[in-house]
Structure formats: C-alpha cells, structure tokens
Amino acid sequence: MNLKAIAKRVHKIAPSVNVEEYRGCVRLTGELDDWDSIYRCGVAAVSSRSRGVLNDIKLKGFHEDVKVPSIRDDAIDGATPDVLVIGGGITGCAIARELSKLDIDVLLVEKANDVATGASCRNDGCIHPGIDLHKGQQKLYYVLRGNKMYTRICKELGCDIERWAQTFIFSTKWETRVIAPLMLLKGKILGIPDMKYLSKADLEAIEPNPPKWATGAVYLASGGVVSPYKVTIAFADNAVENGAKISLDTVVESMDLDADRVVAVHTNRGTVYPKIVVNAAGAFSDIIADMAGDRTFTIHPRKGTDLILDKKKAYYALSSFARSYFAPLPPEAREETHAAVGHTKGGGVMRTVDGNILVGPNAIEQPYREDNTTNLADINAIIRKQKVAAEELSTADIITYFSGVRAATYEEDFVVRKGVFTENVIEAAGIQSPGITAAPAIACDVRVWVQDMLGAAFKSDFNPERKHTPRLASLSPDEREKYIEKNPAYGEIVCRCEEVSKGEIVDALESPLKVCTVDGIKRRVRPGMGRCQGGFCSPLVVKIIAEHEGIRPEDVLKGDEGSNVLYGNTKEVAE
C-alpha cells in the first residue's frame, strides 16, 4: 500500500492523526474533538491494497454506557461446543440454523434477552435485488445468492414473503433516456434477473398512485419483503428444534488465546471452550474480532430511522406489482437530503409484509453502537423527502417509529472469511444493509468452512420445517374455524388491531426459543403492533404471560431487564 498517499489524505482532514501500517492494515490513532472528522479520516484511509482500516482515533470526552445483563451465573460454564456463534441477529441465527444440519454441538450466545433485538428488528425487511452494489463486493456475491434462497427458506420456516418488485422512478426525460439504460446495463453486468424499463404509461398500468412527476421507471422483479425479526426468530427456533443451544442474556467479556487459536471464551454466565468461534456480533463485531486477535476492520455505527404508518394508508404503495419507491428526486426536492453520508440506498415508501406502510430510513453517522433514540427533526425530514414519491404522506398517519444502527465498515463491504491471524475464528462481520438478503447465503459458506475445519458430517434427521402456528388472521373463516374447534383459545381475540388470539400468544410462550416478555410475544405474533400500539391488549398479554408462567403480573417484563410493566396495586383490596 502507498502509506504516504494515505497519510496525505488523512492529514488534510486531521494533521494530528498518526497513520501507520499494522498487520497489513492501515491503523489510525490519536484524539479528535468531533466524530465527523474521525469518520472522514477512516474513509480517507481506505485502500484496496490493505486488509482494512483500523480506526482507533479516540473521540475526546466520549463514553457509551453499553447495555449488559446484570446476571452472573454458571449456566454455560464449562461448555465445550464444536462451534460458538456470537450474536443473535439474523446472520448469527441463520448460521446457527445452517450449522444445525451438521452432526456437531452448536451454541449461540446473545447479550440481549431475545434474538432480533438489534438491527434485525430495526430495518425495512427488503429482499434486495442488488442493483446498488458493485462487482467484486462480498455484498453482491451474497445478495445474489441469498435473494434466490428466500422463497424456499420462508416456506420451510413458515414466514411470509412477498416478491413485490422495487421500482426506481425517474423525474425527467433525461433520466429515462440516460440513467435507465445505464441501470439496465449495470443489472445485466451484475447478473440481476428480471429487470425491465417501464414507460410512464406502463408504470400507471401497474401502480395506481405513481408520483405526478414520474417520467418512467426501472422495474426489478426479484425484489421482495419479509418481516426481518420474524425470520430471525424462525431461524433460531428451527436451529433449537434441530439441537442447537441458545444462551440469552450472555455477553462475551474476553477470550484466551494460545498461539493462533482461541481456547476459552469468558462470559457473564461462565467460560466456554469452543473448537471454532463465529463472530456475528453486528455493531460489536470489531470488538469481538479484536478479542480473538483477528481484527482487520472497524465498525462505524450508522443510525437510521423508519416510520410505520397505519394499514388504512396502504394505498400509498399498493398495487399488483410495484410497491417500493426508490426515486431520484425531482429538481425542487434535491436540496432536501435525508442523510449526512453518501452510503445509503435513499429510503423510500414501501408496503411491509404485514400490510403497513414503512417510510425511510435516513442515515446518520454517529459514535454510538446502541443509540436507538428517535427525534422529531429526523421524522419530519423523512416525511418531507418521501412526500416527493407519495404526496399524501402525513405525520398524522404515523403509528410508531424506530431507529436502528447499521454495522458499517469503512470499506462499505461485508467481512465474511476464515480468520486471518486466528485459525479457529470465522468472521461474519460488517453485515449492514442488505444483510437480511445476504444472511442465508453467508450461513451456507460458514457451514462449508466448519465442515472443512472439523470434518463434520450432515445429520440424517435434520428437519428444515419449523413447527409453528400460522397467523390466523390471514386464514379463511373455514380454516380458522378448524383451529378454534381444536382449541377455543384461538377464538379469543386479545389484540383487536392485529386480530391476534390468546391461542397464538400461548403458542408463542411454548415455542422452541421461549421468551416470556411483552416485547418477545410482540415480535412473534404481533399483539401491540396495530394502531393503538398495545393500548388495549398489553394488559391482557401481561395477564396471559403471568398465568402461563405461574408468576405475578408485577414480575412480567416489557423487554429489557428491569422493564416491569406493573409495580403493584394502587390501593389495597379490603379483606
């Protein structure tokens, strides 16, 4: 690498930063007063001739209180799994499920009280075609493979998937004449199937509410949408059904290395002695890689906010085919940007697999790995930007909103590989968007590497089909009646907005990966995700959890440790 040229770029931003070569990487050290400068130094240090950027510049006065479970016990102390997977997002859970096909012991640890609590429950669930990617990227390699796998996987896991196309809508004749052909050519070069150009008339024929300024569009039929948290949970459930173990509320604190191997992993719930460690720790994956002596990358957290609209507004993006807008802005809107950085797909207006409209996200570089806060300025900016594609958008239609943190590397690519410096480590890191699409393909490669490293054989009794209760609200009256005949609790509606029955909630409490919190049930069967956001059903869900688990209602948690929903009676009942 040309370290002098890299240092020159970095020093234009921050002359005090030290630039050095370290283990084939570009390492930056020093201290700066603002995060934007630290981020820009990391971008300036990227080189195709280095293994990656180690951005160790400190932000003056910065400290983040990372959430860790207070529990300390020996629940997994002394465990000797063949493979330890660190991280319960969609990548980690897909890997655990894929590894459960092998005749090995698999243990997944997750520091939260459930899987799918980070970025895997805080994104739009798009199955991306890959048009925004580039030749040579791991992102492209895994997205093209993963996209093709999703229809089969969702059938096996009992998850909904809709192959709704993505449409890039153009605002000028110049764009339709120049950008559209270039996009089609790029798609052909990248190997993206089923792309075509739509004239304005073609667009209006399939989309009842196209923007008035639309002059044409590029249509990508391979696009799709899933519920990201439901797919993550389904991967985890099926992994457990096939023998994998999952330890929640378990944070990795340190590792012991012997030469070039991890020999012990210390957690708050005991020390584990794995043969192989798989790093799928999301926004913390560079920290885990550092513990394992295998770091070649740095995660810079990128925050994004999404808005969820009432189902009654589904016509914003509802048609037979094209339901997602990713539109180049018309001239009058181009000054309204929704991100402080350029690495974003631009957001859009799309219909989720559950029937709501999702608007966003934006993209903001910031130093916090767990900052899921929202603010009014971002919400208003997202609405202003996306009103270009859907004029009727209004803050009055928002029923909830959320933020998530993407685990981006400075190279803006995934880090999926065997260990470079530590031979029994596998990295599945830097998995930002489109990580949902890529996860099952990444899991396949990890399984192949594990087979090679351990000489593992396939199980003869692996069952790819997850045992589950279908969403009864989606069934016909006759189909639903058959369930009610078997169990009257399926006819007792608890959540009116989402038409969720008591029977479905009890089934969720008896699922392979059992999580007895209000949020855990919400992620599995959707009570509280409708217009009233749990105003009617939350007390009933608390009651059902308490009765099923034989605990006091006051002991039922909303989600995180200490999030008790109730604190006791407001008055004593007379004897």
Image (cartoon, rainbow, N blue to C red):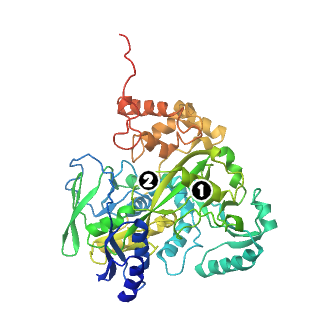
> Residue at left 31%, top 65%?
287
- Establish if 111 lies above or below 104: above
Say if residue 450 shows up in the picture. Answer: no
**Relative side of 268 to 482, left or right:** left
Gap in angstroms between the C-alphas marked 1 and 2: 27 Å
Query: Where is the N terminus found, in terms of image quarters?
Result: bottom left
Evaluate if marks 1 and 2 touch, with contact meaning CB atoms under 8 Å apart. Answer: no
Q: Quadrant of residue 421?
A: bottom left
Relative image position of residue 230 (x, y in whole percent): 50, 51
Q: Amino acid at mark 2?
A: Ala
Along the viewing direction, whichever of 492 and 195 lies nearer the viewer: 195
Give the label on residue 116, or none: 2
In this rendering, would 40 be left or right of 146?
A: left
Depth check: give the residue in front, 332 or 549. 332
Task: Indicate the position of residue 517 as horizontal and vertical percent values.
Answer: 41, 40
Residue 438: image x %, image y %? Answer: 49, 67
Residue in front for this viewpoint, 335 or 442: 335
**Where, quadrant-wise, is the C terminus in this rendering?**
top left
Instruction: Look at 63% across and 80% down and name the residue there.
Output: 186
As drawn, 198 above or below 395: below
Return the disc, 1 or 2, that comes first in the chain's sequence: 2
Label 2: element kind: loop
* Among the 4 quarters of the image, the one containing residue 550: top left
Q: Residues within 10 Å of mark 2 (few under 14, many from 20)?
A: many
Q: Tell me the residue at 60%/61% (across/down).
A: 224
Of the pair 232 and 120, the residue shown nearer to us? 120
Q: Which mark is residue 381?
A: 1
Give the secondary structure at mark 1: helix
